[in-house]
């Protein structure tokens, strides 16, 4: 059976627009919270193939998305490299910061796959469990976004610690990006070998970098990952998500070589249709806060997006992930609106 999402990404769109949502498995779903409550540590949850498989499938069962995204986290990669990573309830991720050569030297690719292999097992289980027409998406964080956490030790305003290390100690900073490029490429290849149809690279914090840094810290590492993955898996589409990249989005698409690009909420759609969509499949870009509000406002904006992007390859998605306060019934209305649309 054909996979609508995969075919659309490969440049063969049909009358229906495929859809999935960032953070479609998450705290807005009561059945997610129930499984989540059985594991005290979030990282342990990510490494539990039975539970990670179960929560990946939950939104598909409820809403019938065309794509299922592997349940894990972008911070699995630094954890696999040997950095200490944990999540504090009500706070978010915490890591032992890598800001010295000594800390960098403790990172290693040697034990990487052994540490993260349960994620590959989740992918294998999903491959068997998913309906044939549902596309399975693997993912990883992009080196820059992951580095903001590795260097800052937590989420940070303006990613000041990572920027300052990038400027103040460019040698150490480059080594951190390099090991992330290698680990991430291997990690994505292993997900593809385990059964992922597509992979997405999340660069959530690529906003407002000066142009030379956007080139060196966002485009170059992503391009290197795309080349490494393509050299082993030529046919597998790769979606990039340089969130809030603004006018840099066009060069990101041209220079990284991604197959598709996820549009954040701020991207003007007429511009995207003209400048981006002729080159790659676009994915986006409903404001997740509209799904909290729901109703006619959400439906009208959904239709505006579908209309604006109907001239080329489009996968419907959000401009960023669902927030925990999203009412599940609004996701049902959103899903029906997309399913009923014909180009
Ligand atoms: O459904 C899906 O989207 C798949 C799973 C997924 C998660 N995180 C699960 C998760 C994916 C693709 C991610 C990616 C991720 N993780 C990103 C990039 C995308 C984005 O949102 O910008 C980033 C920056 C992270 C790092 C991260 N993980 C943070 C900052 C936090 C804490 C903040 C928050 O939203 O709670 C997480 C935790 C996390 N990852 C949760 C989920 C469902 C919530 C924690 C929980 O359930 O206890």
Image: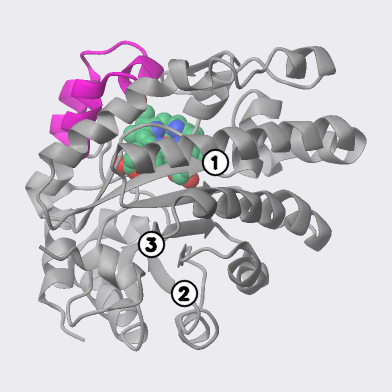
Q: Quadrant of the C terminus?
A: bottom left
Crowdedness of circle 1 by 10 Å Cα count: few (<14), some, many (20+)? many
Residue 251, percent from left and from top: 66, 71
| Alpha carbons under labels 1 and 2: distance apart | 21 Å
Badge 1 vs badge 2, beta-carbon distance below 8 Å: no
Q: Residue furthest right?
A: 168
Mark 2 residue element = loop
Q: Mark 1 or mark 2, which has the lower sequence index?
A: 1
Is residue 323 among the parts visible in the rendering? Answer: no
Give the residues drawn in magenta, as a range: 29-56
- The residue that label 3 is drawn on is 287
Query: Mark 1 against mark 3, which lies toward the viewer?
Result: 1
Q: Please, what is the dominant secondary structure of the magenta stretch?
A: helix
Q: Quadrant of the rendered structure where residue 302 is?
A: bottom left
Rendered position, 156 above or below 137? above
Q: At x 55% / y 84%, what residue is drawn? A: 275
Q: Is residue 212 left or right of residue 152?
A: right
| Mark positioned earlier in the residue sequence (1 or 3) | 1
The numbered mark at residue 185 is 1
Residue sitting at the far front: 232
Residue density around tag 3, few if under 14, some if 14–19, many if 20 or more, within 10 Å: many
Q: Quadrant of ligand 1?
A: top left
Q: Secondary structure at mark 3?
A: loop
Query: Which mark sits nearer the N-terminus, 2 or 3?
Result: 2
- Which residue, given by chain and number where applicable, does mark 2 sit on? 280
Whole-percent x and y of residue 341? 15, 79
Nearest-to-viewer mark from 2 and 3: 2
Would residue 31 appear left or right of 322 to someone viewing this image?
Answer: left
Residue at (31, 45) in percent of width and height: 196
């Amino acid at each position: 059976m054909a996979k609508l999402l995969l075919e659309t990404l490969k440049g063969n769109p049909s009358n229906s627009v495929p859809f999935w949502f960032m953070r479609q498995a998450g705290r807005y779903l009561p059945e997610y919270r129930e499984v989540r409550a059985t594991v005290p540590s979030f990282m342990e949850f990510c490494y539990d193939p039975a539970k990670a498989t179960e929560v990946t499938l939950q939104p598909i069962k409820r809403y019938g998305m065309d794509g299922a995204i592997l349940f894990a986290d972008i911070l699995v990669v630094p954890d696999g490299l040997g950095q200490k990573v944990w999540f504090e309830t009500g706070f978010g991720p915490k890591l032992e910061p890598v800001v010295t050569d000594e800390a960098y030297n403790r990172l290693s690719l040697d034990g990487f796959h052994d540490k993260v292999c349960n994620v590959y097992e989740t992918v294998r289980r999903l491959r068997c469990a998913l309906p044939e027409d549902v596309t399975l998406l693997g993912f990883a964080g992009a080196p820059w976004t992951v580095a903001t956490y590795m260097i800052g030790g937590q989420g940070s305003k303006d990613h000041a610690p990572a920027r300052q290390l990038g400027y103040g100690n460019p040698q150490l900073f480059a080594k951190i990006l390099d090991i992330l490029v290698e680990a991430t490429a291997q990690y994505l290849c292993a997900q593809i070998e385990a059964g992922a149809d597509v992979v997405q690279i999340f660069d959530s914090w690529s906003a407002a970098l000066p142009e030379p840094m956007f080139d060196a810290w966002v485009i170059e590492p992503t391009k290197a990952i795309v080349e490494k993955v393509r050299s082993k898996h030529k046919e597998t589409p790769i979606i990039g998500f340089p969130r809030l990249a603004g006018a840099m989005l066009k060069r990101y698409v041209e220079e990284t070589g991604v197959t598709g690009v996820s549009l954040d909420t701020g991207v003007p759609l007429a511009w995207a249709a003209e400048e981006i969509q002729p080159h790659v499949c676009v994915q986006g870009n409903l404001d997740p806060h509209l799904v909290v509000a729901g109703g006619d406002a959400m439906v009208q904006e959904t239709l505006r997006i579908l209309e604006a992007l109907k001239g080329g390859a489009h996968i419907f998605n959000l401009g960023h992930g669902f927030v925990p306060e999203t009412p599940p019934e609004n996701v049902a209305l959103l899903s029906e609106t997309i399913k009923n649309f014909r180009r």
